[in-house]
Amino acid sequence: MWMIHGETVQSSLPQDLPWWQPDHAIFFGVLYAVLGVIGTGMAVAIFKSWWDTLHPRH
């Protein structure tokens, strides 16, 4: 079997999808940007709750 463009031996991605096309890059760029914003918001909320636990306001 011949390897196709973008395929690696260790790849778990479906090999019939054209991952190198620009619309995939835009989709995954937006996906990871949204996940980054959500993750940052969760990290800030966790940090603030931890900070408030250590430094209670009276």
Image: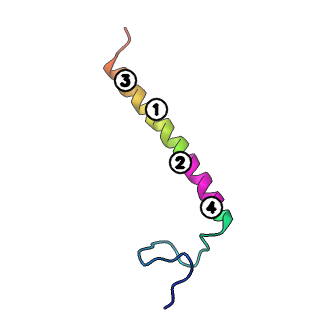
Identify the element where label 2 is drawn.
helix
Query: Which structural element holds mark 1?
Result: helix
Say whether marks 4 and 2 touch (CB < 8 Å): no
Which image quadrant: the C terminus? top left
Q: Nearer the viewer, mark 4 or mark 1?
A: 4
Residue at 43%, 78% in the rendered image: 9
Q: Secondary structure at mark 3?
A: helix
Q: Identify the mark nearer the N-term, 4 or 1.
A: 4
**Residue to which mark 1 is pinned:** 44
Instruction: Using the numbered discs, state the Cα–Cα distance from disc 3 to disc 1 in whole angstroms.
Output: 10 Å
Name the N-terminal-most of marks 3 and 1. Answer: 1
Q: Choose the circle earlier in sequence order: 4 or 2.
A: 4
Residue drawn where x is 55% and y is 52% of the image = 32
- The structure residue drawn at horizontal position 60% and vertical position 54%, both measured from the top left corner, is 29
Please provide percent x and percent y for residue 20: 61, 70
For mark 2, what is the residue?
35
Q: CA distance from mark 4 to mark 3?
A: 38 Å
Q: Amino acid at mark 3?
A: Trp
Measure the C-alpha gap from mark 1 to mark 2.
14 Å
| Residue on which disc 3 sits | 51
Q: What's the distance in space between the residues labelled 3 and 2, CA to CA?
A: 24 Å
Q: How many marks?
A: 4
Stretch of the chain drawn in magenta: 26-34
Of residue 11 and residue 5, the one placed in the foreground of this image is 5
**Residue at mark 4:** 25
Q: Is residue 29 magenta?
A: yes
Q: Residue furthest right?
A: 23
Q: Is residue 55 magenta?
A: no
